């Protein structure tokens, strides 16, 4: 799905701001009619949970309602009028006046509605958006709803980050011409100093299409006709980690001399390949340094905020970090656009986190329901997961910053049904995008001995908590366990290994001369022990510390106002580990 854009043929109105807000009284309440009877207002974009002091709103399970008046610009009478929600977490229903115009399940990918038939240029309409935060066995991520003894509904889930919900990303009203460009796919290639650009333009009706490629100075460097083809760029400037270079593919629908629609698609020319135990970008070995992150800030929850976007990437640059993983869901499109422009490498993840009921038994191995069964995660869950993959790739396929798809975080990989569940999803991912490697991350419960799916992927991605959940306080054992595990995976699969998570909870200001968990010194020593192990293993192609910053979680006896494994606090102040990482990553400068 194309991002709404203002071009010579398209107009864009941003609907962010304060909306009337109300909590639904009954689950599944719809359709919506009439104005909301409420005193509450909610900011868009923002998760609604932390805006209000009322814990009944924060803990609400079910629908909430956002409403505002919107005026369609006067000049739009010949245009198609579209509404676009960058996300509604986790399910959205959109009403124009009293008419339902769109429904969507999946909390981190966009959807739109063609509302042309329901509105008139120059007139106002009442826009109501229902958002449901419920997670079930059929949603991605999954969850269950339980009823407390006093009758309250409670949301349970198998991931730790807080289930923030609402309209956490922008809402847009935009116009497109009646016959318009619907989709663009750009697949770049590099042949010595020549860039190749395979393109495909989808249109809403058969139409004559022409394309031009402009370089960063706006000079035309290639041009073609037709809805698909391959263009060449001589003396191409490739997109490189740390040295971004973007071209602009200008796609036009033409009718004789007249241009009916124009869309600008930024792209970079770069290649990605896994060869042996190396991860190659433009044919050169790349070593990932950086983080698993979260979209998480005080008050806004998962609300997108450009100031935090800029500041987080400033901090990553200060550290010498070159990459990140969009843990554990697709991030706002603004994040990947920024990464494209600044040469930051991204691993793009679906919201398939917590597909693992074995975690209920934890490391004790207590009995737990099977993860994959008719009553737990089943064929319908997999269908929702497949849809999440389609929407992720549909949205993000043209970003040069995205070098790998991550189809799940820490699923159960040793139980019956794991392979049947994942094999078709990996096939689908490769069919949708044959050009990027595919991975899934492995939890501590996945070992080289019990795993049944790691061979499906291009890179072995390990989330390991030696020195924390295992061998807590004993970094000598932690380092030895890390060493032997890396060796075992190399022997088993001979693929590159990316450390997608390792970290220790740390309270800033807590100090010790001994290896004491939760102190700043322990976090530093914990990371150093891991780095020694990584440096001894040639197959390790990168290190992503868990986490960039502290983040909010559901309550738990091992959480102190959230997960504290951040190298920065939630308000982005460095812990001692930030300075230690900076010394290491600046000396590695992104390449090993
Ligand atoms: C993990 C998860 C991550 C958690 C982390 C932790 O393995 O992937 O989402 O936050 O452990 O700190 O427990």
Image (cartoon, rainbow, N blue to C red):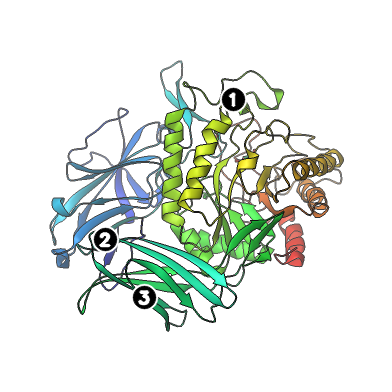
Residue 568 rendering spot, x and y as whole percentages:
65, 53
The residue carrying pointer 2 sits among few (fewer than 14), some (14 to 19) or many (20 or more) residues within 10 Å by Cα, namely many
- The residues tagged by marks 1 and 3 sit, at their Cα atoms, a distance apart of 51 Å
Tell whether 553 sits left or right of 510.
Answer: left
Residue that mark 2 sits on: 174
> Above or below — where is 365 with respect to 462?
above
Residue 221 rendering spot, x and y as whole percentages:
44, 81
Q: Are marks 3 and 2 in contact (CB under 8 Å)?
A: no
Residue that mark 1 sits on: 416
- Mark closer to the chain start, 2 or 1: 2
Rendered image: mark on residue 591: none
The residue carrying pointer 1 sits among few (fewer than 14), some (14 to 19) or many (20 or more) residues within 10 Å by Cα, namely some
Q: Residue at x 17, y 64 (%)?
A: 76
Residue that mark 3 sits on: 224
Residue 539 rendering spot, x and y as whole percentages:
75, 52
The image quadrant of residue 241 is bottom right
Q: Nearer the viewer, residue 429 or 9?
A: 429
Query: Is residue 495 among what the camera can see?
Result: yes
């Amino acid at each position: 799905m194309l991002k709404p854009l203002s071009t010579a043929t398209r107009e864009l109105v941003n609907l962010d701001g304060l909306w009337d807000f109300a909590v639904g009284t009954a689950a599944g309440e719809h359709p919506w009619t009439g104005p909301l009877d409420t005193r509450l207002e909610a900011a868009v974009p923002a998760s609604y949970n932390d805006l209000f002091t009322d814990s009944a709103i924060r803990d609400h399970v079910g629908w909430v309602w956002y409403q505002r008046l919107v005026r369609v610009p006067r000049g739009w009478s010949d245009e198609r009028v579209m509404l676009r929600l960058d996300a509604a977490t986790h399910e959205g229903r959109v009403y124009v006046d009293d008419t339902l115009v769109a429904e969507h399940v999946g909390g981190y990918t966009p959807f739109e509605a063609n509302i042309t038939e329901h509105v008139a240029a120059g007139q106002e309409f009442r826009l109501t958006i229902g958002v449901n935060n419920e997670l079930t066995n059929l949603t991605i991520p999954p969850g269950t709803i339980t009823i407390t003894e006093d009758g309250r509904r409670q949301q349970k889930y198998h991931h730790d980050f807080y289930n923030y919900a609402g309209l956490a990303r922008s809402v847009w009203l935009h116009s497109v011409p009646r016959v318009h460009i619907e989709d663009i796919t750009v697949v770049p290639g590099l042949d010595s100093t020549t860039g190749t650009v395979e393109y495909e333009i989808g249109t809403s009706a058969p139409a004559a299409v022409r394309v031009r490629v402009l370089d960063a100075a706006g000079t035309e460097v290639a041009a073609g006709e037709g809805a698909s083809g391959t263009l060449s760029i001589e003396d191409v400037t490739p997109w490189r980690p740390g040295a971004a270079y973007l071209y602009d593919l200008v796609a036009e629908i033409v009718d004789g001399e007249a241009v009916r629609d124009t869309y600008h698609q930024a792209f970079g020319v770069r290649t990605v390949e896994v060869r042996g135990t190396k991860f190659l970008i433009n044919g050169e070995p790349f070593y990932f340094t950086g983080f698993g992150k979260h979209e998480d800030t005080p008050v806004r929850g998962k609300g997108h905020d450009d100031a935090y976007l800029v500041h987080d990437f400033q901090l990553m640059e200060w550290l010498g970090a070159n990459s990140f993983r969009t843990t554990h869901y697709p991030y706002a499109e603004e994040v990947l656009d920024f990464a494209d422009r600044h040469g930051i490498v991204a691993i793009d993840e679906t919201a398939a986190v917590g597909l693992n009921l074995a975690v209920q038994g934890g490391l004790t191995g207590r009995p737990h329901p099977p993860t994959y069964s008719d009553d737990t995660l089943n064929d319908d869950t997999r269908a929702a997961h497949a849809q999440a993959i389609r929407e992720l790739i549909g949205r993000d396929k043209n970003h040069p910053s995205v070098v790998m798809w991550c189809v799940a975080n820490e699923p159960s990989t040793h139980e019956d049904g794991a392979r049947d569940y994942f094999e078709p999803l990996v096939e689908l991912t490769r069919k949708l995008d044959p050009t990027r490697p595919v991975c899934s991350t492995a939890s501590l419960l996945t070992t080289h001995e019990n795993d049944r799916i790691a061979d499906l992927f291009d890179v072995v991605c390990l989330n390991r908590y030696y020195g924390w959940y295992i061998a807590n306080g004993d970094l000598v054992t932690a380092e030895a366990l890390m060493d032997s595990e890396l060796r075992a995976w190399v022997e088993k699969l001979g693929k590159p290994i990316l450390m997608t998570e390792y970290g220790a909870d740390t309270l800033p200001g807590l100090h010790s001369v001994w290896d004491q968990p939760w102190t700043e010194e322990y976090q530093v020593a914990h990371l150093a022990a891991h780095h020694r192990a990584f440096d001894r293993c040639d197959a390790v192609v990168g290190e992503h510390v868990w986490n960039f910053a502290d983040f909010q979680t559901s309550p738990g006896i091992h959480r102190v106002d959230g997960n504290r494994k951040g190298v920065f606090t939630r308000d982005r102040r460095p812990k001692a580990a930030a300075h230690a990482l900076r010394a290491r990553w600046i000396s590695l400068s992104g390449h090993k």
